[in-house]
Amino acid sequence: MKIPFKSIAAVLGAVLVHACEIPFSLEDTAAPKIYLQCIPAPDSTVLQILYAAPAVGSSTGNPPSFSPQASILVNGQPRAFKDQGAGRFTSYEPLQEGDEIQVDVTAQDLPAISGKTTVPPVPHITETVVTEEKADTSTFRKVTLTLDTAPKEDEYYGIQIRRRTAVLYTDGSFDDLDIFIVPGKLINLLDSGTVTMDDFVQVNFTDGLFNGFLDRPMTILTAKQFQGNQYSFYLDSFDTDIWSTISEIDWENLPERGEDWDEDDWREYWSRDREEQEDTRIPVGSATYCQIFLYRLSPETYRYAKALFQSNFNFLANMGLIPANFTYSNVAGGLGVVGALSVDTADFIEADNAILKLILGQNPPSGYRP
């Protein structure tokens, strides 16, 4: 007995459709909660407190008034902070590694929330080495960071790289491009088998908070991304070009066109006249300044950042084809995260001393060799 191919296809299609079903009910509603994000750093603490409305039900939308009240305890002692409005609170009193942080938030007609964390130890970069590595006909710059100790399996890190490039022209003007880049791992597309998605876990970290933008990416690292006590990356590899985004342009240092110009005027000028401007000016030289921020993350910060990345880049879940990702929260009674981080920095400059002084207006750091 022969079974028609169309019948087999119909049966398989029905099975697949049934397998993709995700049962839910619009009657399964949740109560509104308080959302809190707080990632204390050694030099500042920022709290973002928002009203979290359920997706369906009678409690959707913002409440008539939402005026949260927050308190911060550091090692059991109250910490002063400033209410910036719109649910944002800041404190610039310094913190030390090992400090225990507790945040409590209350708001009218909503359950009180709280979260705890501990400031992690500060990472220590002992050496930064920039070398050149060739692949086919191209030359790539490789940066190797050496730490004082090798990361352990239960330690978590993050890295941000800020690159500022300035070009000086004979008329005294210069272009200044500020960009945050991601640490590249691929100088040859044939090497893609040597990396995994864990090498490309990135979330945006700006002004002490994680958000959904991509202008200042932080790459999340575990012990797997280190070789002993060293971490290496490329400044100009294929994946750096794909992921990096322009952060800002130094508008104050563009050629003068009038004191009454605002930023929109400058942006229009930059996009419309830049090609003509570059054709008429003669470059004298350029300088590139790179600043590396290496973070040590508390376990709560790492788990929240990893869950945020998975939520942002799980396209199948975003299209409703598979269940949504797990959302991490360590906020009792509410949503969000109370985590912490510490940071060490390293920098290097690529320019001769004369160009460096003209463009960046500063002397080379100690240890710099032109």
Image (cartoon, rainbow, N blue to C red):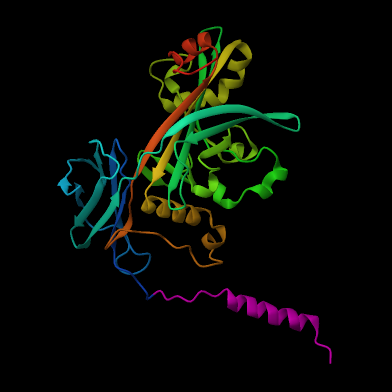
Q: Quadrant of residue 88?
A: top left
Could you say where residue 212 lies in the image, as x and y percent from the top left? 44, 47
Residue at the left extreme of this rendering: 78
Relative to residue 339, is residue 178 depicted above or below? above
Say whether residue 25 is magenta: yes
| Residue located 61% across and 11% down the image | 280
Residue at the right extreme of this rendering: 1
Relative to residue 355, is residue 272 depicted above or below? below
Residue 216 shows in the view: no
Looking at the rendering, the stretch of residues picked out in magenta corresponds to: 1-26
Q: Nearer the viewer, residue 184 or 285?
A: 184
Could you say where residue 137 lies in the image, as x and y percent from the top left? 75, 29
| Residue located 48% across and 76% down the image | 23
Say whether residue 285 is magenta: no
Q: Quadrant of the C terminus?
A: top right
Residue 43 shows in the view: yes
Could you say where residue 106 lies in the image, as x and y percent from the top left? 19, 56
Q: Nearer the viewer, residue 328 or 273?
A: 328
Relative to residue 338, is residue 247 depicted above or below? above
Q: In the rendered view, does 41 fall on the left or right side of 362?
A: left
Could you say where residue 310 lies in the image, as x and y percent from the top left? 50, 56
